[in-house]
Image (cartoon, rainbow, N blue to C red):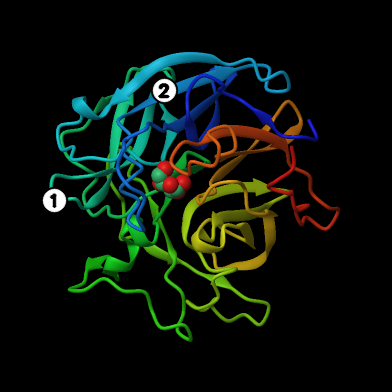
Amino acid sequence: MKTPKYLVPDLYTADPAVHFFNGKLFIYPSHDVESGIPENDNGDHFDMRDYHAFSTDDIENGTLTDHGVVLDVKSIPWSGRQLWDSDAAQKDGKFYIYFSLKDRNDVFHIGVAVSDKPEGPFVAEDAPIKGSYSIDPCVYEEDGSHYMYFGGLWGGQLQRYRDNKAIECGHEPADNEPALCSKVVKISSNMLEFAEEPRDLLILDENGEPLKAGDHDRRFFEASWMHKYNGKYYFSYSTGNTHFLCYAIGDNPYGPFTYQGVILTPVVGWTTHHCIAEFKGKWYLFHHDSRPSGGRTWLRSLKVVELEYNSDGTIKTIDGLME
Ligand code: FUB
């Protein structure tokens, strides 16, 4: 599949997370809706209320089964508003959705919901994960241990925290200071808590220096994803206001990581978000754009395209406007 294919023609879906569960590829996206809320830098116009899950065993033809609503904001005991990006994981026959949601004070946290089946329905815990903040959880599993990567700037509220504590007035560092980082934390064996304090996931430049806050073309903004290829760890993310999907390579799940380049150039729409998964011997980039909605940035559509590596392990850049 050398050209991108839209996956869900009858629903607006975004922020994909993809996993191989029970012999199939399961896709857990955000479900975009027309909220009527004017667009702003806080992302208030992304007022999503539920998640659908999809599965397939034929991604090349893009034939998906829609399992319907698997989690609804109304069933989450601590919910305020805005069900943003999520991810899923499995352990010991149970399945977990980790999701971004604002509480009733309009503060984002990460929640978890549990099911016996990957297609749900999922039942949310009574409270968000203790010590969680900001948005965009990505859960990476290795040898039975699960690591969560999370965080997002601006509407995602990451600039309101330093050292895992809320600060008086949220702000980004000065341009010549180190950029704010995605966070990485090990999940406890019951899958419902953090097993430790979240750590900074450092991204270094070609001189071994942390990327600077003013380096908007390369610094982390949101949309963390982790995958492993040929024994190396690939951390990928969005640069937000410069609209690139970039990646950095490291030797272990905690990093540090060294910046490598761009996976996907800007798409139609403000946000760009993705995940990377291997299926039947090929690697795929799942992502979204706003072309089908005529550029309405809050109404996005899931896409998939094959991802290719060079022989040195670098990723071939994909044109975000390719049709
Ligand atoms: O879908 C809402 C937000 O937009 C996500 O959480 C971000 O990653 C961006 O895609």
Which residue bears the numbered disc 2?
52
Disc 1 on helix, strand or loop? loop
| Residue positioned 36% across, 46% down in the render | 187
* Mark 1 or 2, nearer chain start: 2
| Residue positioned 54% across, 42% down in the render | 295
Residue 143, above or below 153: above
Q: Residues within 10 Å of mark 2 (few under 14, many from 20)?
A: many
Labelled disc at residue 174 = none
Check contact, mark 1 vs mark 2: CB within 8 A. no
Badge 1 amino acid = Asn
Q: Is residue 284 left or right of residue 102?
A: right
**Residue 163 coordinates in the image, percent (x, y):** 29, 71
Answer whether residue 159 is visible to the viewer in this image. yes
Badge 2 amino acid = His
Disc 2 on helix, strand or loop? strand
Which residue bears the numbered disc 1?
105
**Residue 101 coordinates in the image, percent (x, y):** 27, 42
Quadrant position of the C terminus in the picture: top right
Q: Residue furthest bottom?
A: 176
42 vs 149, nearest the viewer: 42
196 vs 106, nearest the viewer: 106
**Residue 13 coordinates in the image, percent (x, y):** 48, 31
24 vs 261, nearest the viewer: 261
Quadrant position of the N terminus in the picture: top right
